[in-house]
Amino acid sequence: MSQDKEREIQLQFLEEAQDHLDAIESKLIGVSSRVELTRQEVDAMLRSAHSIKGGAAMMEFSTLSHLAHRLENFFKVIRTQKQIQPEVERLLLSAVDCLRHVVTTNRQTNVVDEQWQTSQVQPLFEQLQQILGEPREEQETVTPLSPQQGLETIQMLFESEVDAYLQQLETILAQEDKSNLGAEVVTIAQDLSDLGEVLELPEFNSLCTSVKQLLATQPAREEEIAQAALQAWRRSQAAIMAGQLQGLPSTLNLDGVVEEVVSSPSTADPAPVSDASPARLSSPLDLAPPAELKETQENTVRVPLKQLEQLNDLFGELTIERSGLDLQIERLRNSVKILERKVRSLQQSHHRRRTATLPPSPFPSALPTTSSFLSEVAFSPDSSQLQPNTTPRSPQPTPSIDSGNNLDEAADEASTEVMANLVQLQEVSGDIDLCLQETEQIVGDLNRTAKQLQFCINQLRMRPFADLVGRFPRALRELALQHGKNVELKIQGGDTPIDRSILEALGNPLMHLLRNAFDHGIEDPETRKASGKPEQGTISIEAAYRGNQALITFKDDGRGIALDKVRQRAQHLGLDREAIANASDEEVLTLIFEPGFSTADEVTSLSGRGVGMDVVRTNLRQVRGDIKVETKAGVGTTFTIGVPLTLSVARVLLVESRGILLAFPTTAIEEMLLLDVEQISTIEDKPQLHWKEYSVPLIYLGDWLKFRRLQNANEERTQPLMSAPTVLLIANGSDWVGLQVDRCWGEQEVAIRPVEGNIPMPPGFNGCTILGDGKVVPLINTPELLYWIATSQHPASLEPEDRHRAAAELQNQRPTILVVDDSINVRRLLSLTLEKAGYRVEQGKDGLDALEKLMSGAQIAAVVCDIDMPRLDGYGFLARVKSNPAFQQLPIVMLTSRSGIKERQLALNLGATAFFCKPYDKQQLSETLERLINGGEKRAEEAIQNLKFKIQNSNFPDFCTGGFWKKSARQSL
């Protein structure tokens, strides 16, 4: 057998040995407090120790085998006892710890530190031997491992160790030189015989002894004996792998007959061995393990944790790219809609132009009527799209006395050609729309597959909650024995899967809560009895799912937290006496998580240093978790811990504050509502939001999060969910808190990325996410943010008027231009031009969107607007804005592909301040906006006079290169 294969088998055995030790420990905990010790429990521990002993001997872990053998002897002694003392329980648990340490050491090397054995292991086992003694003869006859109960261990050893010996024998038989065949067979038979003895398989042991006897009496027939032995061993192996432990071959003879041992009448009826009979097992094909067993063995593979982390990171990148793909599909869909709308508009314009330019004719029959125009195109039978009519028309009688007929024919041909091109353009638009629909379907399938992949990856990273709390009963039992308290630990939801990283982070917090509940919460038996409680205290830990969170409830039935002592301790530490007196119970309870805060009268090995609860909160913050406390004097205390299901992917709500996008986990937000000034009042100089029947503290997030640079929070990725100031209602303990943000952009599933570097994250932030367009958005840790706000000095309170004035001053430092166009590429290009010129840019995808931004209170210095847009076009936008007295002085520049004098005159009459045609001169546009925003009366008046002169005297092309101003704009300047 190769060394790698042998090492793999050894590691598998050590995993099994760890499970056996866990089983022994779980049955030992609290064994001294039971009224009577059941034999079934001791037998289970005895079998586990015996399995470790036999397997360790086969794997050449001598120290582990020796210690397991001694532990097995102790169990044989206590098997006849009805009850054991607490000291024996403690020593046995310590002995299990010694075996666990050896198992951990054997994962790295087979050598165990002798000094450690001499100083710690031997005194412990000698102390146990002095108390329990050695097993008597009748106790030695105990069979700890029956064939059926040890079936898995036996099958594992026969699949690995026995198979290796048999492969070695097959290799020797295949060689030409068989001079050492007899000695090799004797060695193999002896090793297999020892294995049969350890595993208590008398038939297999007898078969190996028969092989040795035949080799000793008939050495000349050693090759024949070896062949027969190989066949008999293979039959035994196949029968054992099939679960048939009884009726195995027991004697080998050279006639090819394998004798079997007949079970005694007192033995239970053996399972039928017809499937393992020589006739059936003679074929090599029948020697393989059953398919069911083979499938079970292949269901488990070992994967390094590093590879799982890499797989998780790659899925995070996939989530980002998937969001980017969704964004591009949405943009493409919008572009297709614009294309279709432009084609329809062009068809209508062409029809109007053709009708308007037909010259009058003295021959009415020659005029192209509506029916004759429609005859130029026809409907395709396969679609509703217009198609050129290729059917030749019959010659029409044309008068020849007017030479203008030739011009009519030329115009008619040009019109037909334009219409044909429009029809072809419409067909292309339809093809693009069809391809886009198929692409959207594929993207939908991709998203569903990605979600399934995410679920599978999360399952790979999950571990049952019992892996964490499985060691707690042992720790609590040792504390109970040491301090004389009788405490029971109840664990529910042990099979709840939790992310491995989160589970590791929960280890210390839960252990601190356990020790704190035992020391501060659970009373001694006399006090509990005097209070009318059972002498045995109870600590319960429960894990369950709630939405996208895992909730862990930690509860005890002790004395509860003394709030008066917490207040006294807070005053002793120098906190404001009046603030403490006015604080609610929930606010007072948050003090127990402060560093150095403790209500213990003295420092002990368990508590009193004020470190444990601080560790709880700090570790939970690292995994975006929170903790809530509820207590009642004389009844007990309940801690509720909430942690996300995974740390790699989260669903967040994108909000905007001071022009910066922020990501709030959706699990932290209870409700959203639009900010209504009438619902706001001031109590003790603090704003309060009246919501339903509650008065909720209102926090203006922009007052606390002040960024050093201005950013455009959104480059029109999507339509905002709420484009007005919004309040996020967040549960803070048992109270509500309202966070006011500027606007919300909706929910999105994002990948969470840590921020690396030596500079720590600001309070309230614990990572970031990357959106589909590549924008990095900070992730808010809601509990930490609220805690930071509550413990920091409140910023200068601003009245609504002062807040608007401050916002206006901020905007005046860098004017904001509102760009309104239904083409995202035009908005991008124009925004880039204006940002280079030093302006901030807000974007609107149509007139209605732009109107909503203006009505929401956005401080806009000027507007650059297109004319042809969906929902509300540029003319409608102009009419609505200029009809509002608040916006009559707002400069609005029209930037459009329409260059007709009628369009320009209509925009002028509706209140446009300037007019540019596409393509436009970037420098001239920038200068125009600068004059509009910062220009004086004289320059505006001169520009208007020049514009009027240009309108009266300029030709059509020259007019498209300039801008003009209305007289009302001069008055506003």
Image (tube, rainbow, N blue to C red):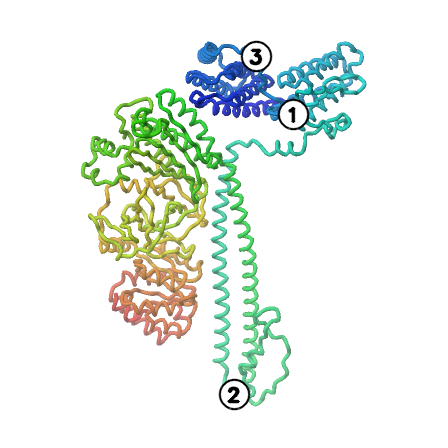
* Residue 135 in view in this figure: yes
Q: Position of residue 81 (x, y in %)?
A: 49, 16
Mark 2, residue position:
361
For the residues labelled 1 and 2, say whether their Cβ atoms are less than 8 Å apart: no
Q: Identify which residue is drawn at 22% across, 53% down.
A: 799
Mark 3, residue position:
138
With respect to residue 787, does 410 lie above or below?
Answer: below
Classed neighbour count for the residue bearing mark 2: other residues with Cα under 10 Å, few (<14), some (14–19), many (≥20): few
Q: Residue furthest left?
A: 578
What's under tag 1, amino acid-wise?
Glu
Foreground: 200 or 702?
200
Q: Position of residue 671 (x, y in %)?
A: 36, 51
What's under tag 2, amino acid-wise?
Ser
With respect to residue 754, does 347 lie above or below?
Answer: below
* Residue 63 in view in this figure: no
Q: Identify which residue is drawn at 65% across, 18% down.
A: 196
Classed neighbour count for the residue bearing mark 1: other residues with Cα under 10 Å, few (<14), some (14–19), many (≥20): some
Foreground: 455 or 803?
455
Q: CA distance from mark 1 to mark 2?
A: 105 Å
